[in-house]
Image (spheres, rainbow, N blue to C red):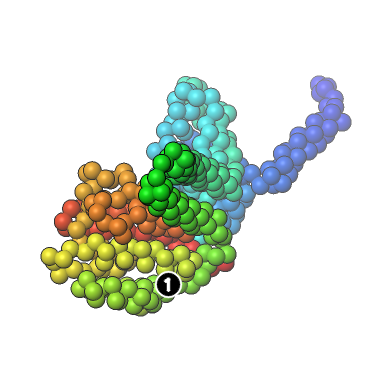
Amino acid sequence: MKFPKLNLRNYKSNTSKSTFEDQKHKTALEISNVGLWDWNITTNKVFYSKESKQIIGYADDDLKNTSEVWDSKVHPDDSDVYYKNFNSHLKGEIDLYENEYRIKCKDGSYKWILDKGKIVERDKNGKPSRIIGTHTDITKLKNNETQLNKSLQLITSQNKRLYSFTHIVSHNLKTHIGNLKNILEFYDEASSETEKKELVGHLQSISESLTTTIEDLDDIVSIKSKVHTNQLNERVNLYNLSNKVIESLKIESDKRSVTIHNALRKDEVLLTNAAYLESVFYNLISNGIKYSDPNKKAQIVIQSIQSKEAVKILISDNGIGIDMTKFKDQVFEMYQTFHGTDRKDSRGIGLYITKTQVEALNGVILMESKLNEGTAFSITFKKQKGL
């Protein structure tokens, strides 16, 4: 019996071609640092390529070949969507499984993974029996995306504040200029020296008011433009800074019989701009003195709450307070006063400048107050590493 002659040349050529294609794909994955996974659903065995393991900090023989070992490392906040998307693919609801999620690395940190997969084999009943997919480290991309979103939010916020600021400038300057124009017209029409003298007095008042407005606006522009990253890296001892401000206000606090308690820890340090933070403390503490209740044993308390990510400074008093139901949306606006128009020491610019300074230091300031009970300010700064 004669056997057909095998075409070994073609056989070798096909085998060589197949090996070359496999090697080409393997090299492409290594160069791109894309991990490969291959799940046999029937046996629940998963092959994870060394690239997949390297992404999360494991050596080639560190991970068991089961789906549970990878599933258990998915961030709890991402696990619901992770399972939902994968099951949708198994059910045939979507042609390709694709998901972005955080996964826990060997060192305890998290990385962002782009996970893709597709059913490549089914059993005789048509149920999925094998899925092949890839893992791609997209941590840098996600961080850039987060930073971009933060920058966009910052720009949007700055644009809103700029619009508000230009509106204030325009309104205030137009008001002063309009008053000047009116007085000058009245002066031209005045028939007596007494009337002209009175109008000159009005001109002087308007001039002083205009000068004050320009100084206020100049202060705000200065705050918004001068703080840079390198100026936010001073090591500031909060206890010492607070004591310095308290001492500078001692005459005023003694005059109004206000007791100031510095409850900050003596070793508490914040990386920030010392001059601006001192100004913030000064404004808030002096406000507590200015609006103390003469019918109470007046007190101001300065303390802080520390967390791993942030420092929250609390400055509270038991003074006359503000009706927040009426003024909640106005407390940090320019030229807003809340304690009666007879107070000549209230220009309505202090809290606006304080908020501007806190935001220049990348902080957040909030206020709670109750009429006849007192006011509490909280200033929160995220902790940062030294440059």
Residue 48, percent across and down?
57, 46
Which secondary structure, mark 1? Answer: strand
Q: Nearer the viewer, residue 208 or 298?
A: 208
Give me the residue at 24% from left, 54% from top: 342
Residue in the foreground of this view, choosing between 308 and 79: 308
Q: On screen, 276 above or below 10?
A: below
Residue 34 x %, y %: 64, 44
Which residue in the structure is indicated by mark 1? 269
Q: Quadrant of the C terminus?
A: bottom right
Question: Disc 1 residue type?
Answer: Val
Badge 1: how crowded within 10 Å, few (<14), some, or many (20+)?
some
- Residue 180 vs residue 368: left or right? right
What's the residue at 40%, 74% (across, down)? 241
Considering every residue shown, the one lying at the far left of the view is 295
Residue furthest to the right in view is 9
Q: Residue 145's quadrant in the figure?
A: top right
Residue at 53 percent across and 33 percent down: it is: 98
Quarter holding the N terminus? Answer: top right
Nearer to us in this view, 344 or 226? 344
